[in-house]
Amino acid sequence: MKKVNKSRYAILGMLMEKSRSGYSILNMMQQSTAHFWQESDASVYPMLKKLEAEGMVTSQSELNGKRERNIFSITAAGKKEFSEWLSLPAEDGTHRDELLLKLFFSANATKQDVLKQLLLHQKKVKETEQRFRDVEEKILSQIPDEYEHKIFWVMTLQNGKAHAQAELKWIAESIGVLEKK
Amino acid sequence: MKKVNKSRYAILGMLMEKSRSGYSILNMMQQSTAHFWQESDASVYPMLKKLEAEGMVTSQSELNGKRERNIFSITAAGKKEFSEWLSLPAEDGTHRDELLLKLFFSANATKQDVLKQLLLHQKKVKETEQRFRDVEEKILSQIPDEYEHKIFWVMTLQNGKAHAQAELKWIAESIGVLEKK
DNA sequence: ACGGACATGTAAGCAGTTACATGATTGC
DNA sequence: GCAATCATGTAACTGCTTACATGTCCGT
């Protein structure tokens, strides 16, 4: 089964909401989809060109002072491709978690080293959870309920929060298990 | 910051427990680390060769009837490299979740399509959860408590279970939100 | 006899990251 | 005047997967 490039759908999806520059797409990803989808600039700009060559998007140059930027808009063909992808069943991706890999092999480590890993991880997850809370507050207060995207943005955010909380609970339990060892 | 290949540590870690063939490493990954780490045969076999060339592992050919297999053992240098990696702080990897990506853009989908996605996902997660339960039972009943790896194997498994449960709870809530929309 | 597990590998290609490169604008 | 942000892109490299390729052993 040939694997198709999913980056294109992430980009097309961002353009479904409104026309945007490559930079704006990257920003949106950083702010809103970072916990389940990211792209780097080195993949977004070339992909936009490719999508334009395929007729899925069109661009028009705008001048903002002397600074130029390309605003991309999705075409009918692009919308069609996007919609087809949207209704296909989602494939499960691979996830690699280095912390769990280390933990799996930690019979070879000292108790202190393992605890250090877990505590550092706990700190990171707490920060992530806080970021989720901040974003949630912003979405709930600043986006009107009628805005059609809101419910789904909140839903994906809840997913992030749920997993962060599950992770924190698991960390606490794991530290407990280790300490009474 | 240059990214080093982490596959090598996954392989070295497997060889820390005992000497194994490439096939056995792949099996172990499929059975035990699949939910947070996987490698394909096309990466394990070449990596074993590379590790051998670097002096991190040695191999010896065994005959099992007429069928040959290479059993790899970790060397002192390999153990050293592995231990150094083990005590370094874990880096967070990128995870891409196509379901969440679709959901994020689902203002452009019908309610039915979204529900279909969620229900299919729910089915998959339930299966995963069941697999975790099966493995847990196997580990708890078949591996003696004194075996030093047991506690960490159980720990990584609990992580999988915790996230599967969090995901199921989130799915149920999301379906609820959608239905009263 | 046949299917499934055992067992090992190569080749091709796409994906994705890091590093490199450049320049304007805005706010302090 | 300087730093941060806006804005776009290329080149080189590594990584990883899919598909290809081959053959044995064991149980039914």
Image: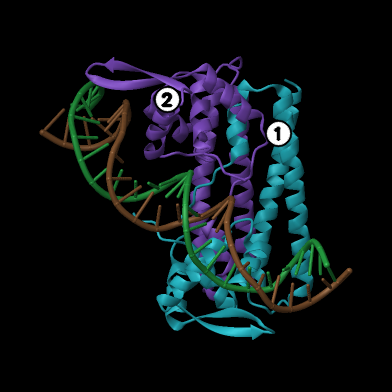
Chain colours: A cyan, B purple, C brown, D green
* Residue at the image point whose x is 76% and y is 47% from the top: A126
Q: How crowded is mark 1: few (under 14 residues within 10 Å), some or many (20 or more)?
A: some
- Give the x, y percent position of residue A33: 62, 62
Q: Mark 2 lies on which chain?
A: B
Q: Determine the secondary structure under disc 1.
A: helix
Question: What amino acid is at disc 2?
Answer: Glu
Question: Looking at this view, is D18 or B144 the one in front?
Answer: D18
Distance of mark 2 from mark 1, alpha carbons?
29 Å
Mark 2 or mark 1, whichever is nearer to me: 2
Q: Which mark is residue B52?
A: 2
Q: Mark 1 points at which residue?
A: A117
Q: Contact (CB < 8 A) between labels 2 and 1?
A: no
Q: Mark 1: which amino acid?
A: Gln
User: Horizontally, is A59 left or right of B52 in the view?
Assistant: right
Please tell me which residue is depicted at 46% across the width and 22% down the height of the picture: B55
The secondary structure type at the circle numbered 2 is helix
Same chain under badges 2 and 1? The reply is no
Q: Is residue B137 visible?
A: yes
Which chain does the numbered disc 1 sit on? A
Q: Which residue is drawn at the image coordinates 50% and 47% (left, top)?
A: A94
Q: Where is residue B169 in the image (x, y as percent from the top left)?
A: 63, 52
Asked whether, in this view, residue B92 is left or right of residue D9, the answer is right
Q: In which quarter of the image is residue B45?
A: top left
Q: How many marks?
A: 2
Q: Which mark is residue A28?
A: none
Residue A111 drawn at (x, y percent): 71, 23
**Which residue appears at 64% of the width and 68% of the height?**
A28
| Few, some or many residues within 10 Å of mark 2 (<14, 14–19, 20+) | some
Quarter of the picture holding the C terminus of chain B = bottom right
Residue B166 in the image: x percent, y percent? 64, 48
Answer yes or no: is residue A155 visible: no
**In the rendered view, would you say A99 is above or below D11?**
above
